Image (cartoon, rainbow, N blue to C red):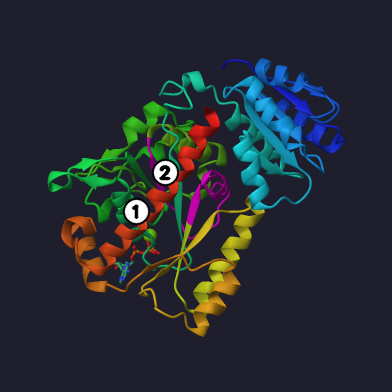
Amino acid sequence: MTHKSLALISDNEAIQSSVARAVDRLDDHSLETLSGTLSSVNGHASQLLCDNDLLVFSLPEELDVDVVSDLRRSAGPGGTILALSDRDITLSEARALNKLGVDEILPFPIAQDELTEQIQRLTLDKSLLPAIYNPQMHRLGHVISVCPARGGIGASTLAINLADQLQGHSGFFRKTTKNKVAVVDLDLQFGTIATALDLQPSSGLMTMAQQGVTPDRTFIQQSMVQHSSGLEVLSAPENFMPLDVLTREQIAALIETLRMEFDYVVVDLPRVLVDWVGAVVNASDRMLMVSDSSVSSVRQACRLIDFFAKERLEPPVEIVFSRERKPTFRSSHHIEAQKALGRDLKFWLPNDERHAKQSLDRGELLSQTAKGCALSKSIRTMGHKIMSETEVGSNDQRNKAA
Ligand SMILES: Nc1ncnc2c1ncn2[C@@H]1O[C@H](COP(=O)(O)OP(=O)(O)OP(=O)(O)O)[C@@H](O)[C@H]1O
Ligand SMILES: [Mg+2]
């Protein structure tokens, strides 16, 4: 492992000692602390950003945005910046900071494990990563997790068919694809994706657990199976595997490595809350919560969103209502559900038992068995919407780097 250096600018003693403890727990990481704020260290910050792998600063009550943009401008796109905030910040403030060039914003206080893991992630040696690390050239895949509010709701059906649509098929026989897409079945004990796609289950995740390996590019190449549609699949193991044998660090590394290799990474989550689910929540650019309009499912979805909120400042949850066609007018129970969930009912998937079952039984995708059916069309529309929203996002990123 190569040596990693961090610089911290903060006048908050709790932040100083928490970052120092996190760095102590990582091998080969060192820390230089400067007491003050980004503005008070006056220009010295850009030198620190150039000289270190990661610059951490605490967010003051009133942030002078010019200081942050000057910092990014003078240091270029190379260095990584982490802001720790001991006050509540809004999503738009967080987005604005991202746009100015802050790579990550975390709430403080933060669990010690979580801070250590985030520092490790942010100081990953980009030169060892597969693609040449160039913010304009490397893939920085969009991670979409799919989370079911109850069993049998259609989450896995959505995960695989959405992943298929995100490939952006075009051309003769729709054989040309625009995007490289991975599907990961993290429903370790009851995962159905290998069966649903008629693939041999992979023992990769089992090996990762048994040997305690941190997944890298080679692991991914050895563990993923390609489906005839082009999708690369990391399935759940065939044999029973306890859920808690995987660690948060392993799952975080798995997702970050996949993000470097693929344009989209679709993760099918289990219906249990095990520690490493937190790593998926943290890495998700978008989390699709699959529910229906029944009171019990909506309540369950709310509980999950509250749980995820403890992991992350603003979990990027979007609601998918399954087995219900989008109504022309929302009824009172839809409005109630929307209120309880605190967000729009963004996507709707019609009830289409016949085609869903048919494709599952044949071990094929909807685009292969029933391309024109209502369910397939809804997932296609959803894929297009996500792709158009993601492209806007990545253009922002590119502009930021330029
Ligand atoms: N939109 C839909 N309309 C009707 N039936 C559906 C729909 N989506 C999936 N199904 C059917 O529901 C069943 C469960 O689907 P699926 O495995 O995708 O759900 P899940 O939420 O992943 O379930 P699990 O709790 O087992 O993980 C399957 O038989 C599938 O054919
Ligand atoms: Mg499932």
Location of the N terminus by quadrant is: top right
Residue 266 falls left or right of residue 196:
right
Callout 2 amino acid: Glu
N-term mark: 1 or 2:
1
Residue 331 falls left or right of residue 313:
left
For residue 159, say whether it is visible: no
Give the residue at mark 1: 384
Q: Which residue corresponds to the image point at 48% horizontal and 68% vertical from the top-left?
A: 345
Q: In the image, which disc is placed on residue 368?
A: none
Q: Position of residue 229 (x, y in %)?
A: 21, 46
Q: Is residue 305 above or below residue 30?
A: below
Q: Position of residue 250 (x, y in %)?
A: 51, 37
Which span of residues is magenta-colored? Answer: 262-287
Q: Local crowd at mark 1 within 10 Å, few (<14), some, or many (≥20)? A: some
Check if residue 277 falls in the magenta segment: yes
Task: Name the image quarter holding residue 77.
Answer: top right
Check if residue 378 falls in the magenta segment: no
Q: Which residue corresponds to the image point at 79% horizontal and 28% vertical from the top-left?
A: 9
Name the residue at the bottom extreme: 332
Q: Which residue corresponds to the image point at 79% horizontal and 45% vertical from the top-left?
A: 86
- Label 1 CB-ligand 1 distance < 8 A: no
Callout 1 amino acid: His
Tell me the SS state at disc 1: helix
Where does ligand 1 appear, by image quarter? bottom left
Q: Position of residue 123 (x, y in %)?
A: 60, 26
Give the residue at mark 2: 391
For residue 142, say whether it is visible: yes
Front residue (pair 96, 155): 96
Front residue (pair 340, 2): 340
